[in-house]
């Protein structure tokens, strides 16, 4: 791992960017709730509850990062060794660990939702066998990440925890990419069949769904690649990319929910 001092600028930039993205998520959440309030049915209740839980978990993550920044740069600015030493010694404090747990739960939830959407699109359980196995793998790796970061001084940017974290986020990224491709493939095939039989007017709905999925997932996927590469090479910028990646994870699911709600 690079010296913790080199992590301070990326941490500050990451906190700033995630504050901006959280503002966007706030707007998307309340807009989604407004749309869902006018709908009826069990699925409406489910998506309202799911969106609320996502919003709560990402808020927990954001608050813990704000508190840690305040403790590191304001309350303990005279800490022996400076903010860099404080970061190294307190990056695994209980509230930071709590925020990290919220992120893992959030990621498992959004991944599971994508798998369920894939099942609905294909009307088959067989197509989600491999994604489900990947999900179980990410669950196990997520548990290992928490186990290795729980001890004092443990964090996902150094030591054994970084190896598990890299494996965990790689498995999750692979899961998201594969499920997204499976969904888009199904929609494109359906769209082409409908276009051939009924014309473009009836087929545009399928292609619109594909564009919505791609537009929502692409920023998340690109930030995930940047995070994984920087984490893999041990770069301090991984802290900034991590913050962006986590917020875009929520924006992806929230955006799809909002834009596909009747």
Image: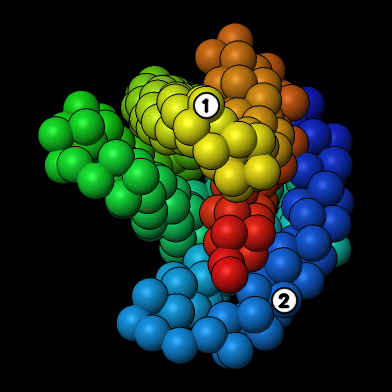
Q: Is residue 246 visible?
A: no
Residue lying farthest to the top in this orientation? 233
Residue 132: x percent and y percent?
Answer: 21, 38
Q: Is residue 72 above or below residue 1?
A: below
Number of numbered markers: 2
Residue 240: x percent and y percent?
Answer: 74, 36
Q: Residue at x 85, y 42 (%)?
A: 13
Front of the two marks 1 and 2:
1
Label 1 environment density (alpha carbons within 10 Å; few <14, some 14–19, many ≥20): few
* Figure quadrant of the C terminus: bottom right
Q: Residue at x 66, y 43 (%)?
A: 201
Q: Which residue is mark 1?
A: 196
Q: Earlier in the sequence, mark 1 or mark 2?
A: 2
Q: Which residue is mark 2?
A: 31
Q: Residue at x 34, y 82 (%)?
A: 42
Give the SS element for disc 1: helix
The reply, left or right, for residue 230 in relation to residue 131 is right
Q: Is residue 131 visible?
A: yes
Residue 146: x percent and y percent?
Answer: 33, 46
Q: Is residue 158 above or below residue 64?
A: above
Label 2 environment density (alpha carbons within 10 Å; few <14, some 14–19, many ≥20): some
Q: Is residue 121 above or below residue 38?
A: above
Q: Marks 1 and 2, Cα distance to the nearest angstrom?
A: 36 Å
Give the SS element for disc 2: helix
For residue 128, what is the image quadrant? top left
CB under 8 Å between callouts 1 and 2?
no
Q: Residue at x 65, y 59 (%)?
A: 259
* Figure quadrant of the N terminus: top right
Q: Which mark is residue 92?
A: none
- State the residue in front, 106 or 238: 106
């Amino acid at each position: 791992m690079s010296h913790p001092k080199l992590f301070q600028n990326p941490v500050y930039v990451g906190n700033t960017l995630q504050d901006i993205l959280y503002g966007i998520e706030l707007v998307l959440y309340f807009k989604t709730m407004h749309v869902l309030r006018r709908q009826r049915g069990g699925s409406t209740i489910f998506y309202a509850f799911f969106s609320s839980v996502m919003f709560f978990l990402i808020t927990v993550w954001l608050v813990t990062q704000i508190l840690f920044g305040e403790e590191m740069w304001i309350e303990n600015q005279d800490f022996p060794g400076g903010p860099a030493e404080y970061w190294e010694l307190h990056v695994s404090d209980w509230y930071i660990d709590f925020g990290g747990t919220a992120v893992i739960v959030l990621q498992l939830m959004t991944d599971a939702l994508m798998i369920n959407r894939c099942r609905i699109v294909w009307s088959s359980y067989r197509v989600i066998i491999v994604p489900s196995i990947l999900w179980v793998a990410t669950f196990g790796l997520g548990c290992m990440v928490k186990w290795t970061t729980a001890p004092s001084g443990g964090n996902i940017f150094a030591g054994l925890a970084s190896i598990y974290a890299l494996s965990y986020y790689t498995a999750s990224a692979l899961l998201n990419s594969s499920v997204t491709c499976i969904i888009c493939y199904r929609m494109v095939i359906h769209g082409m069949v409908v276009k051939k039989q009924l014309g473009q007017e009836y087929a545009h709905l399928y292609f619109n769904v594909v564009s919505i999925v791609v537009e929502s997932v692409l920023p998340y996927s690109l930030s995930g690649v940047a995070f994984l590469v920087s984490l893999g090479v041990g770069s301090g910028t991984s802290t900034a990319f991590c913050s962006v990646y986590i917020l875009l994870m929520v924006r992806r699911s929230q955006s799809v929910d909002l834009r596909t709600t009747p």
